[in-house]
Amino acid sequence: MFGWFSSLGLGLVANFQETNLEGVHMTGVAMKIGFGILYMYLQTFISCKMSDTVTLSRVRLAMSISCTITAASCGYQAHMTAAISEWLTCIVFLLYFATFVQDFKRISASVTFHII
């Protein structure tokens, strides 16, 4: 659910410009960052429970904490500082998601087609 709400917030940010509908845009920012950080901590907790990803769990925890710090600085009144913090938060999100490559390498799927 955290991931879904974070994605919904990203959709609001992308579709409603700050200059036109500031309230909707800022609601989307809050949803994207807030639920995204909660999602990061939840995924970090889950990866901590996996015995073979201890080092990766520590990296994810450090990224979650740094994302929390950059997100906390988004609340400043200076527009430039808030914009930089918002972009840094998004970059940390993307780097965090890149850590899932190792997890997805272990997954395999096969599809079978039955012709009638």
Image (cartoon, helix red, strand yellow):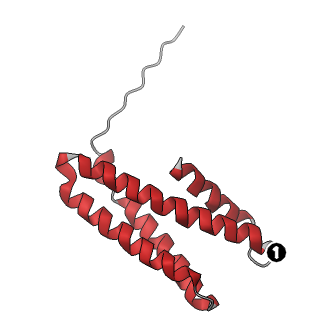
Q: Residue under circle 1? A: 20
Q: Residue at x 19, y 60 (%)?
A: 55
- Can you see residue 13? no
Q: Residue at x 19, y 56 (%)?
A: 54
Q: Is 104 rendered above or below residue 95?
A: above
Q: For the residue marked with disc 1, what is the amino acid?
A: Asn
Q: Is 104 rendered above or below residue 12?
A: above
Q: Nearer the viewer, residue 56 or 116?
A: 56
Q: Residue at x 54, y 7 (%)?
A: 116
Residue 70 position, x and y percent, is 46, 78
Residue 111 position, x and y percent, is 42, 25
- Report whether 2 appears left or right of 42: right
Dot 1 lies on which element?
loop
Q: Is 43 rendered above or below residue 109?
A: below
Q: Quadrant of residue 6?
A: bottom right
- Report whether 15 appears left or right of 2: right
Residue 89 position, x and y percent, is 48, 73
